[in-house]
Image: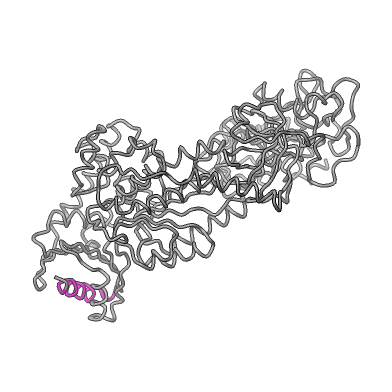
Amino acid sequence: MDWITHEEDVWFEFRGNSPHQLVPGRFYKGTVDGYADFGVFVDLASNVTGLLHRSELDRRLESLEWEPGDDVFIQVKNVRDNGNIDLGWSIRQSDAEFRGARIHDPNGDADNEPVEKDTERGGPTTIKTRPKTGKTTKPVGTSTSQESDETDAVAETETPTETEAPESTEPAESESAAGDEDRTPTATDVVDDIAESESDASESAPDAVEESETDDAPETAEPAEPAETADVERVSIEDIENRVGDAVRVEGEIASVRQTGGPTVFELRDETGIADCAAFVEAGVRAYPGVEVGDYVRIDGEVERRRGELQIETEDLTILDGSEAGTVEQRLADALSDEARPDAVAPLAAHEPVAAVGKSLLDAAEAIRRAVLESRPIVVRHTATADGYVAGAAVERAVLPLIRAEHPRDDAEYHYFTRRPLEEAVYGMDAATNDVTRMLEDRDRHDEKLPLVLLLGAGSTSESLDGLGLLGVYGSERVVVDAAPADDDVAAEVDVLVNPAHEGADARDLSVGALASTLAVAVNEDIRDDVSHLPAVSYWEHCPEQYLGLAEDHGFDADRVRELREAVALEAYYQSYQDKRELIADLLFDADEGLAGHVSEQFRIKLEDEIETAQANLERRDVGSVSAAILDSDAYSHRFDFPPTSLLVDELHRRTREGNTFVTIALGMDELYVRSTGDLDLRAVVESAAAEAPSAGLAAAGIREGRIEFLTGARDEALEAVLEAAAEQF
């Protein structure tokens, strides 16, 4: 049994009932059970399920288009003591790509027997193994329906149709595709027959289709030349809806390239829209390997509809250069400029600091809209606070419909838009390294363009320059939107800065959520009613009356606004690095009042418990003319549960402050948070305190959060120096 020494070339059908009966290293056929954030669950038997972790995939999880119930091939990497099964990716996703199929029957007599492949009709069984992409697998250059009587025969080991199939079971390597006197099904027939029977095997198109005039297989992975394309009419992508079944010519820029288990799919953008163009050589082989993202190309092919999605069956692809490329580039640039920049900004409500940044809001809106039109991912960074999440959700609400309208792929909104919350308002090297690592990986592995990075209520102070600079080295566009004053060196570093203080306006009564909601409406006017209540939700106190009235007009009274704010604040804390897209959308836009009411009740219970303990353990001090309330947050709060220290000190300050010279401090092991009733220049406080206590290692770690770091061994010394420095400013 020579197959035993070549198990890597054989797939197995598992008929056992225990994970521990599996053999690590073997390839098995399984059935997709479902998805999780971290991978795909695959059933190997009725009660045996393994995990194919996203790190094992050769593509993004979001672009893997398997559906529950699909048959797939995977490799068992490891079976853990607790029965968990670690699965590995198999580049081979069709029966024909393996040299054999065997039964793994630990409890029966069929162990190691060949898998029976004959059907009742005498032909090979259809095995649904290809990830569903909704794309055809007709090889470029194969005949159309008018030519099919004289074209390629399908090799016997390839994906069968319901037509009569040859009975030979010789391995595919030893066969040639010989024609019969009767009409032999083409690859297009295979796809259509399988699609009609819902066997979902369209991606396992024949690897052994040969040209009718030659017995030699192509020596390269380049699609064959089309029969006739000279007289094909050039059409715009927006018009292909009316050209299904027609041969067309389109010109534009390659927005992305993705290799499926079957065809190569080129995403083509012209001045009117974007479309998928599928080119097939053989299963999993890159068609037109010289084509890269950003190339201007001409594509000839036939418009088809697959599973409700339009695509172009590519018969010829030509990279344009010189004047031809220049013509296409200019056509796209003109259309992009016209479409990307909004005509004007119409604020949600009259508010002077928002009016002061009208031009920069237009610039930011144009940058966002242009990124969508250029098929460039958008990465939004905002603080993990209620205000930050409201700001991020507002922009998300505006951008996702634009992405859905622009891109034909069902998963485009997850592919082209990402929110990544930050623990604090500093966009430091940790966050920047994370973003750069991901964007370079996506560029190299998936041919993605470098993203637009949008920072909301973050990245506007000098402490963020290192992170912003790292993005700049790679040419990633950076847009910063912040209600608090921004530093001048940040304005010089980023591409667009939206900041009222930078325009000379007083923005002390402006939240990031209110500013970002106005930006969202500038990006997409259609969502104005959806986000009109968000500015009011973003304020903990002193919300301008115009925003409260706006929320009331849209059905959100003061209690409802409070519940939303508290619910978002609680969810912002848990899993703070996750965007929680669907949950946040349910809270802010789509759910009934029961959800927000339930979560906000948990907020109040947890917060009140902490406040009660904190107030009972406050230390009262007078330093000069300043009264201070100091909480030892390490000793009298739950550091690793809700609420976070920053929110706790905010609420303590609201409840304990007295007069115009009051300071509240939450003192931790190596950091403290300070709140003040008056304007406090935190950098000046740190500079003065550091001069008083030079060995304490004092540093302004977060200007927006009022966070100061120090050395653990100099805790008492650091506190005294900060109190003295704060008193000097009053």
Q: Is residue 229 left or right of residue 293?
A: right
Furthest-top residue in this view = 121
Q: Nearer the viewer, residue 658 or 401?
A: 401
How many numbered circles are shown? 0
Colouring style? one colour
The N terminus - image quarter = top right
In the rendered structure, the answer to whether residue 694 lies left or right of residue 297 reads left
Any magenta on residue 541?
A: no
Question: Which of 385/602 is in front?
Answer: 385
Vertical placement of residue 210 versus 440, above or below: above
* Residue stretch rendered in magenta on the structure: 712-728
Q: Quadrant of the C terminus?
A: bottom left
- Residue 504 position, x and y percent, is 28, 61
The x and y percentages for residue 452 are 48, 53
Magenta stretch, overall SS: helix
Please tell me in which quadrant of the rendered image residue 169 appears. top right
* In this rendering, position of residue 550 left or right of residue 171: left
**Residue 716 lies in magenta, yes or no?**
yes
- Name which residue lies at 78% across and 24% down: 145
